[in-house]
Amino acid sequence: MAEAVNPAPTTKPSPDPSRPRLDPDDSKALALLAAEACDDRKAADIVLIHVEEISSIADWFVIATGYSDVQVRAIARSVEDKIEEESGGRLPLRKEGQTEGRWVLLDYGEVIVHALTPEERSYYDLESFWGHGEKETYLGSAQTPTA
């Protein structure tokens, strides 16, 4: 009698063929690191959305508001610097919108960071579009209760 062979669990391929796919815990840690970097530049309304189960493009979205194009660009630079410094030189696979500064997108493969002005965030309403993903509000330094 032949033994049944269980197929290997399927996992998504790495978004960047030059590096292995992050473990789910590591992708969440990367999303939290990005959120922390957004908070470092006083971003408002920082939200993490777990989209791994509903999309093949990423595991997490990090969405943050900057109140001017200068602040949006500063948020994006902060994310790039912090992730590069704390993850051994990891750089975004793609960057979009830095010239205009109204919506900057940083694609790290498993994590995609969106820094937007209030007008862009309201117009595109990414939270509603990806609303079926698990949503976590990041409580940054300005929102942390003091004892």
Image (cartoon, grey):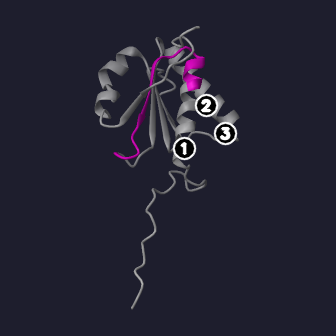
> Is any atom of residue 77 visible in this view?
no
From this view, report whether residue 28 is shown above or below residue 35.
Answer: below
Q: Quadrant of the N terminus?
A: bottom left
Q: Which residues are magenta?
A: 36-54
Whole-percent x and y of residue 14?
52, 54
Q: Secondary structure at mark 1?
A: helix
Type of the residue with mark 3: Ser
Q: Nearer the viewer, mark 1 or mark 2?
A: 1
Residue 10, image quadrant: bottom left
Q: What amino acid type is highlighted by mark number 1? A: Asp
Of the image marks 1 and 2, the number of the one nearer the N terminus: 1
What's the residue at 32%, 19% (across, down)?
122
Q: Which residue is mark 1?
A: 25
Residue receiving disc 2: 80
Do the residues bearing badges 1 and 2 touch, measured as CB atoms within 8 Å? no
Residue bearing mark 3? 87
Mark 2 falls on what kind of element? helix
From what the image shows, is residue 2 above or below residue 95? below
Would residue 55 be counted in the magenta stretch? no
Q: How many marks?
A: 3
Closest to the camera, between mark 2 and mark 3, is: 3
